[in-house]
Image (cartoon, coloured by chain):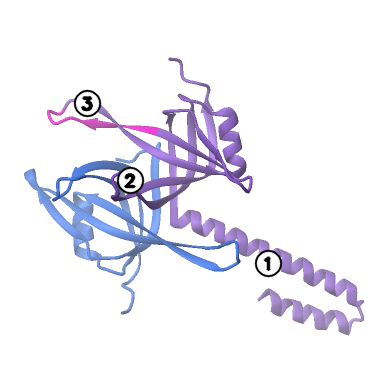
Amino acid sequence: MNNLNNTVQLIGRLGADPEVRTLKGDRRYARLRLATSDTYYNKAGEKVQETQWHNLVAWGGLADVCANHLSKGQEIAVEGKLGYRIYTDKDNNKQFITEVTIHDLLMISSRKAG
Amino acid sequence: MINNRIRRTGRYTFASSFNRTEYRLEKVKLINVEQALTGAKQKTMKALKNHVQLIGHLGADPEVKTFENGRMMARLSLATNEPARGKNGEKSIRTHWHTLVVWGKLAEICAKYLQKGREIAVEGRISYRTYTDSEGNSRLSTEITVNDLLMISGKRAG
């Protein structure tokens, strides 16, 4: 749902193909890994490139769009909301995860060559 | 492009016997404009690529730290609420707690004017950081680096 008090916009490239899963009741979701890069100059005046990896989640029809049209290297723009979740991993440890639940997606360019 | 234009105007000004200092001044001015433009472009590009806007209440007073070089940092905890449905379809509210990091002048403002319960709007970007917890596990923490901050209302009653 579009939310005015929690909005995220990201533009970047996918680091992997979308991972699509189906839950009970035919609810489908797709998980994406998106990289945004950031360059800045440090104290010594050197150019530093910093990459942030975001976890994106798309539900319903958008998950189908992701599954059918997106692949690794594709550049996309997304809008969504920021959320946090706790889950238990296979070693029974509690893990905190940050996810951006997207509700709008735009494909910017075709797949990067190579 | 601007450089080409300078060269062209340069030749033109010399041809029409303008004096040399005037030409130099013009060149300096143009270079400054060019630098300002690239700076502005970089800033907006960053904001476009990784942009977060949040509106919510503070869950605690700001945690302020001053570094040796005099730089200030404030850490805020912000709650955003969204409507949700429970398993049986009943209405509920889901709260997400965001960690905000504010630097410099803005951190001073935070320290001075913000307190628990205050409603604020912020604009910034998501950044992730790995740290080691007390048990030696490496964990990923998510922080919102704040670029802009707006105080919306006074302290919430209660």
State the extent of the magenta-drawn residues as a range.
Answer: B79-89
Q: Quadrant of residue A75?
A: bottom left
- The location of residue B128, given as percent across then percent down, is 39, 52
Residue drawn 70% across and 77% down? B3
C-beta proximity under 8 Å, tags 1 and 2? no
Of B84 and B137, the residue lying toward us: B137
Q: Amino acid at mark 2?
A: Asp
Asked if badge 3 and badge 1 are on a common chain, one would say yes
Please tell me whether residue A11 is drawn above or below residue B30 in the rendered image.
above
Is B85 magenta? The answer is: yes
User: Where, by quadrant of the figure, is residue B72 drawn?
Assistant: top right
Q: Earlier in the sequence, mark 3 or mark 1?
A: 1
Q: Nearer the viewer, residue B152 or A91?
A: A91
Disc number placed over residue B91 in the picture, else none: 3
Check disc 1: other Cα within 10 Å, few if <14, some if 14-19, many if 20+: some
Residue A17 painted magenta: no
Q: Residue at x 48, y 28 (%)?
A: B61
Q: Position of residue A101 (x, y in %)?
A: 29, 47
Name the colour assigned to chain B in the rendering: purple
Residue flagged by tag 3: what amino acid is it?
Lys
Residue A72's disc is: none
* Tag 1 residue: B34
Distance of mark 3 from mark 1, alpha carbons? Answer: 54 Å
